[in-house]
Image (tube, rainbow, N blue to C red):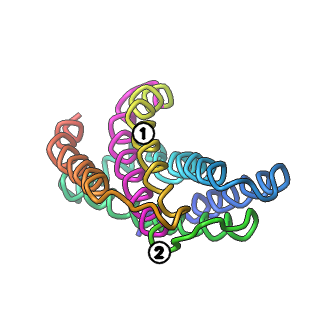
């Protein structure tokens, strides 16, 4: 409920999405499918940083003490993961709609690509929520996010780009084992958050 009340953050991310995609439209108009795909996932990365990573970093010490008094660490981190996942899924669908509106839609298999967008948005939200929880306890928050986040996220983004290439080609199939690998990585992030966050909570 507290996250929902902070509507300025939500509208700020919406403005960021619309402005970024509009600038791409002015610069490129109708890019090729591989350029379209790469730009989309890079935008998803920065949307995740703006929308999700701030979930812990913007919390004041007083509010964290309040959370400490009313909730346990596992309930708290699971609630953060759930809310940020829903937020990122919504932002992913909105960015996909705006991309299709401004830059055209070279997608051949819309259902496959939408599924990958939802999976990718969920993956990005889980990783950055967990990293934000760690970075919030450090003094150099932005530096910690960059140091911890990008080495983990870049391989994941490259994997998502390769998977989504199948949506731009009628004859290409999405490798199910790779999708299952992404789901397993997401499950591992949730498990690590549940196990490790109580140690951060005590501090």
In the rendered image, residue 34, in percent from the top left (x then y), is placed at 62, 50
Residue 55 is one of the magenta-drawn residues: no
What residue sits right under mark 1 in the picture?
A: 153
Single out the residue that lies furthest toward the left.
Answer: 195
Of residues 154 and 130, the one drawn nearer to the viewer in this rendering: 154
Query: Residue, x 55% and y 50% (percent of image)?
Result: 41
Foreground label between 1 and 2: 2
Q: Secondary structure at mark 2?
A: helix
Q: Is residue 114 left or right of residue 46?
A: left
Rounded to the nearest angstrom, the CA distance separating label 1 from label 2 is 24 Å
- The magenta span reads 113-141
Q: Secondary structure at mark 1?
A: helix
Q: Is residue 119 left or right of residue 143?
A: left
Single out the residue that lies furthest toward the right.
Answer: 26
* Vertical placement of residue 203 versus 186, above or below: above
Query: Residue, x 79% and y 57% (percent of image)?
Result: 25
Q: What label does residue 58 carry, if any?
A: none
What residue sits right under mark 2 in the picture?
A: 111
Residue 125 is one of the magenta-drawn residues: yes
Q: Main secondary structure of the magenta part?
A: helix
In the rendered image, residue 150, in percent from the top left (x then y), is placed at 45, 33
In the rendered image, residue 56, in percent from the top left (x then y), is placed at 41, 46
Q: Quadrant of the C terminus?
A: top left
Q: Residues within 10 Å of mark 2 (few under 14, many from 20)?
A: few
Q: Quadrant of the N terminus?
A: bottom left
């Amino acid at each position: 409920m507290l996250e929902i009340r902070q509507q300025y953050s939500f509208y700020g991310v919406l403005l960021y999405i619309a402005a970024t995609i509009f600038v791409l439209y002015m610069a490129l108009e109708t890019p090729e499918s591989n350029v379209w795909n790469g730009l989309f996932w890079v935008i998803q990365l920065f949307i995740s940083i703006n929308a999700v990573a701030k979930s812990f970093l913007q919390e004041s010490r007083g509010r964290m003490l309040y959370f400490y008094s009313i909730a346990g660490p596992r309930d708290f981190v699971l609630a953060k993961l759930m809310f940020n996942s829903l937020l990122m899924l919504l932002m992913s669908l909105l960015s996909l709609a705006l991309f299709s509106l401004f830059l055209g839609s070279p997608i051949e298999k819309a259902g496959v690509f939408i599924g990958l967008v939802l999976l990718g948005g969920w993956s990005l939200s889980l990783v950055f929520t967990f990293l934000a929880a760690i970075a919030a306890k450090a003094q150099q928050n932005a530096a910690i996010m960059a140091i911890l986040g990008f080495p983990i996220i870049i391989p994941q983004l490259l994997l998502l780009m390769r998977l989504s290439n199948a949506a731009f080609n009628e004859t290409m199939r999405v490798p199910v084992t790779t999708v299952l690998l992404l789901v397993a990585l997401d499950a591992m992030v949730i498990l690590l958050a549940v196990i490790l966050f109580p140690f951060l909570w005590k501090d």
